[in-house]
Amino acid sequence: MTTPKPRILLLYTGGTIGMVKNFDTGALKVFNFKKLLQRIPELRQLDCDIETISFAHPMDSSDMNPTGWEKMARIVAEHYPDFDGFVILHGSDTMSYSASALSFMLHGLQKPVVFTGSQLPIGDLRTDAKENLITAIQIASLREDNAPVVREVCLYFEYKLYRGNRTTKISAEHFNAFTSPNYPPLAESGVHLRVNREQLLPRTTDSFSLHTGFNGDVAIVKMFPGITAQVLRAITTIPGLKGIVLETYGSGNAPSGDWFIGILQKAIESGVHVVNVTQCSGGRVNMGQYETSTLLKEIGVISGADITTEAAITKMMYLLGQPDVPAHRFKQLFEAPMYGELTQ
Ligand code: ASP
């Protein structure tokens, strides 16, 4: 008996990958996704059945927001029983935020959800879109013992598959636009497609469920030498603010002056959750390693460990948006990995 081909749902949300140049005006415009197979006939050679679906209004990912995250996650959830894998085509600018957000929404995921995009439009002669798209579909189709090999939200770009909630965009120029500073690639594509199995999330026994709800009453505050009390106070006292991701120096250090600690302490006492992440592109927060971070720990600042800012802000918005997460559990839940987004 022949095993049926994997069924892959390809969702186009927008971004450069789905654009072609209008040769009269030179402007980029979204191309008709129904014609995908015509434009990339190589897709017919893949050993899977592909169905395509597109946002009614494809967007530049700079316009992405929690409503868009929920829209993507709902499409995956609605089609979950009928497909073996999902590929989401998305603008690269905020792809890491979306991949992080979906990783928190899709509980008990037992199928691959692979984000990809490109730096050049699919219609461009030198495009990186074809390789990204073809390999992303191949990864979403990978099966062993009649089960998917990858069972998490990931991001494929320029020969590397990463855990989505570990990624960050690092280049607006190079095809190699993403990195995963604190977690190794899940797979690498060369002559062979090599999956680093020991890095994959282990198989879950939870059944699949979709959890929506994000709270946007949050802010990211990046430290810089000379930041004033006025600026910090203005942000921390925004009415209704529920959380701040504080991008600190090195291993989680910040100014040690009374004014700085005092303002943060007041915010924390008034119920604002403050998470410490490093503004370095790799490494982790270790509050207490230096005196300049000991006080942060004492006033109740939450450690982001080695999480990216993208995953930190989306996890914060997600946890704040869940009715079953009371304020007193926020710190404990944030500091524990949900879907491999941080190492404790
Ligand atoms: N500005 C585009 C976007 O993020 C860039 C891209 O598609 O890579 O939607």
Image (spheres, rainbow, N blue to C red):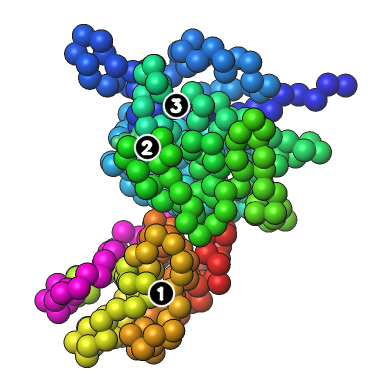
Residue 199 visible within the image:
yes
The residue most toward the right is 1
Q: Is residue 122 above or below residue 247?
A: above
Task: Name the residue that disc number 3 marks.
Answer: 129
The amino acid type found where label 3 is placed reads Ala
Tag 2, which secondary structure? loop
Is residue 324 within the magenta segment? Answer: no
Mark 1 or mark 3: whose residue is earlier in sequence: 3
The amino acid type found where label 1 is placed reads Ser
Report the quarter where the N terminus lies.
top right
Identify the residue at image location x=60%, y=40%. 188
Whether the residue under disc 2 has CB within 8 Å of ligand 1: no
Where residue 176 appears, as percent x and y from the top left, is: 43, 39
Where residue 185 appears, as percent x and y from the top left, is: 57, 48
Q: Quadrant of ligand 1?
A: top left
Gap in angstroms between the C-alphas marked 2 and 1? 28 Å
Q: Is residue 91 above or below residue 267?
A: above
